[in-house]
Image (tube, rainbow, N blue to C red):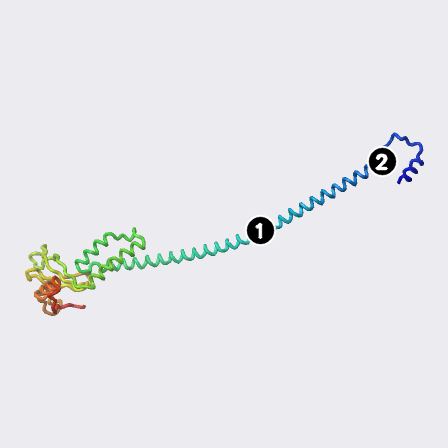
Amino acid sequence: MKRLLWIFIAAFPFTTLADTSNSPEKLMDDWLNLEIQKGQLQSSWSQREQNLDQHLALLEIESERLKEALARRTEISGDVDERRSMLLQQQEQLEQEQSNLKAQLEIAWRGVKSLHPRLPPPLHSEWQAQLDQITPDVLNNSEMLERLLALFKMMEEFDGRIALHRGVIPSPLPEQADAVVLVNQIYLGASQGWYVSDDGETYGYGRATPLGWKWWHGVEAEQELGMALKPEAIDQVRRILENPTTADFVALPVKIK
């Protein structure tokens, strides 16, 4: 290199030594600076490339996590949609069942209203007290069902026993049409009944008819039954019910149809 430079100088002997902008030393310094800068750039790029690779790797990991989270969310969303669909089906089924129950309750309510006049007077009065508290337009299905079941339970209990009741009936005497008579009433379930006054003068037979509960008095009762009805037999049943230890066989006529 020195040889070349010396040759260069020898070829141009008139160049002034003061102009050093293109001197070999300056060119060498520039070249070295370029090499240093190149090395710095390569080192900086290498470090930056490494950082970028690390950042890219982190982004890929984060991307995988997001994909997994999205997959889980999609799965959860699918489960939620399936659960929502199931709940909607159950709701529709419940609404249909409620609608069917309401229709059945309306039928039962009409049956109760139709049956009420045909009940024996004591049970009729008990039902009336309950019916006064039943308002189908206000009560929900559960409340309506509870009230109706209570009525049917009362009837079932009354129908399953022989009941003794002391009450009043309209006087059978034409001249006492507006009067009432206190009598002892005996009911065989909810369909048959007899009554007798304390003095045995007033007696009769009653039963449920399509038009409601009806009493027949004295001779009319015997005609309705088609056989004799003795007030002594009715009174004997009363005494047995009041004192079961005196139980005995007593025949009382009934009418099935």
Circles 2 and 1: CB atoms closer than 8 Å:
no
The answer to which of marks 2 and 1 sits earlier in the sequence is 2
Indicate left or right for 199 with 42 as reference: left
Helix or strand or loop: what does disc 1 sit on? helix
224 w.r.t. 91: above or below: below
Q: Can you identify the residue that label 1 sits on?
A: 65
Indicate left or right for 134 with 181 as reference: right
Q: From this viewpoint, is residue 216 visible?
A: no
Residue closer to the observer: 45 or 221: 45
Give the x, y percent position of residue 93.
Answer: 39, 58
Quarter of the C terminus within the rendering: bottom left
102 w.r.t. 37: above or below: below
Q: Choose top left, top right, bottom left or bottom right for residue 95.
A: bottom left
Q: From this viewpoint, is residue 182 visible?
A: yes
Residue closer to the observer: 163 or 115: 163
Give the x, y percent position of residue 82.
Answer: 47, 56
Query: Which residue occupies 25% across, 57% down?
Result: 150
Quarter of the N terminus within the rendering: top right
**How would you rate the neighbour count of disc 1 (Cα within 10 Å): few for under 14, some for 14-19, many for 20 or more?**
few
Query: Which residue occupies 57% across, 52% down?
Result: 67
Helix or strand or loop: what does disc 2 sit on? helix
Q: Choose top left, top right, bottom left or bottom right for residue 248.
A: bottom left
Q: Choose top left, top right, bottom left or bottom right for residue 233.
A: bottom left
Q: CA distance from mark 2 to mark 1?
A: 59 Å
**How would you rate the neighbour count of disc 2 (Cα within 10 Å): few for under 14, some for 14-19, many for 20 or more?**
few
Query: Which residue occupies 93% across, 34% down?
Result: 12
Q: Which residue type carries mark 1?
A: Arg
Q: Which residue type carries mark 2?
A: Glu
Q: Can you identify the residue that label 2 sits on?
A: 25
Label 2 or label 1, whichever lies nearer to me, is 2
